[in-house]
Amino acid sequence: MIQLRIEQQYAMIGMDIRKPSINLHSTLPSIELQTSPAELEMESPRPRIHIDQRQCFADAGLKSPSVLSEDCVARARSQALEGIGRRVSEGNQLAKINGATVADVAGNSYIFEDKVDFNCTAIPKQRPEISFDLQPVAVNFRRGEVQLQLRRGTVENNFEWGKVDIYLRQKNYVKMYCAEPNINASA
């Protein structure tokens, strides 16, 4: 019996595949801020209060040396004028021929009053003088500043395309032969 042997090999293709790739190099955006704060300066001088109590103390008999000397001078002047007037009237009485005698004039000058007048009063009778020196508030305002510097981010794209190389990896063939060595396969 003759044996016919058939060997066959299928064709095979090979593929070299390089996948596409993307390499991204990015730099982040940055913001540089330089700020100077706002400043507010306020100067508020205190108000000054002037209280003049000289008249209140004068009503209580507590006078300053200058006021006391003025009052003493005025009282002395009025008493001096009253004394001069009294002496003139006494001299005129004595100068009259039918006038009063020296004893009458001396007796008239020493008349005592029987009644003494007492009074109660509240002091001070006048209020103190109060004055104010008000000064305005001085305001000095300096604005704050913001300086902004923006650096944009960048994206560097390095893209490589994918590639498919197709080649014949294995050839196809059909081989037929007889297993008997005596049979010639050529016809």
Image (spheres, helix red, strand yellow):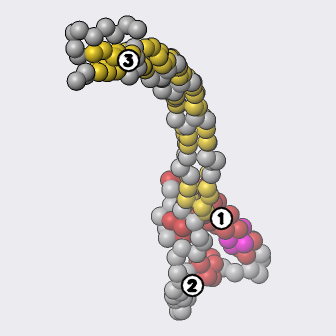
Q: Nearer the viewer, mark 2 or mark 1?
A: 1
Asked if residue 87 lies in the magenta stretch, the reply is yes
Q: Specify the label residue 174 is tagged with.
A: 3
Q: Is residue 14 left or right of residue 158?
A: left
> Which amino acid, mark 3?
Val
**Residue shown at 56% from the left, 59% from the top:** 52
Q: Are marks 2 and 1 in contact (CB under 8 Å)?
A: no
The residue furthest bottom is: 114
Disc ID at residue 41: none
Measuring from the top left, give residue 37's x and y in whole percent: 52, 35
Q: Secondary structure at mark 2?
A: loop
Q: Is residue 14 magenta?
A: no
* Label 1, residues with CA under 10 Å away: few <14, some 14-19, many ≥20: few
Q: Which image quadrant for residue 140?
A: top right
Q: Earlier in the sequence, mark 3 or mark 1?
A: 1
- When asked about the image quadrant of residue 11, the answer is top left
Q: Residues within 10 Å of mark 3 (few under 14, many from 20)?
A: few
Relative to residue 110, is residue 128 depicted above or below?
above
- Which secondary structure class fits the magenta region best? helix
Q: Which residue is mark 2?
A: 111
Crowd class of label 2 (few under 14; some 14 to 19; many from 20; radius 10 Å) = few
Please give the range of residues in magenta.
Answer: 86-91
Q: Label for residue 78? A: 1
Up the image or down, 22 lies above or below 83; here it is above
Q: Nearer the viewer, residue 52 or 79?
A: 52
Distance between the Cα atoms at labels 2 and 1? 20 Å
Q: CA distance from mark 3 to mark 1?
A: 166 Å
Q: Secondary structure at mark 1?
A: helix
| Horizontal and vertical percent position of residue 155 | 53, 22
Q: Residue at x 45, y 14 (%)?
A: 167
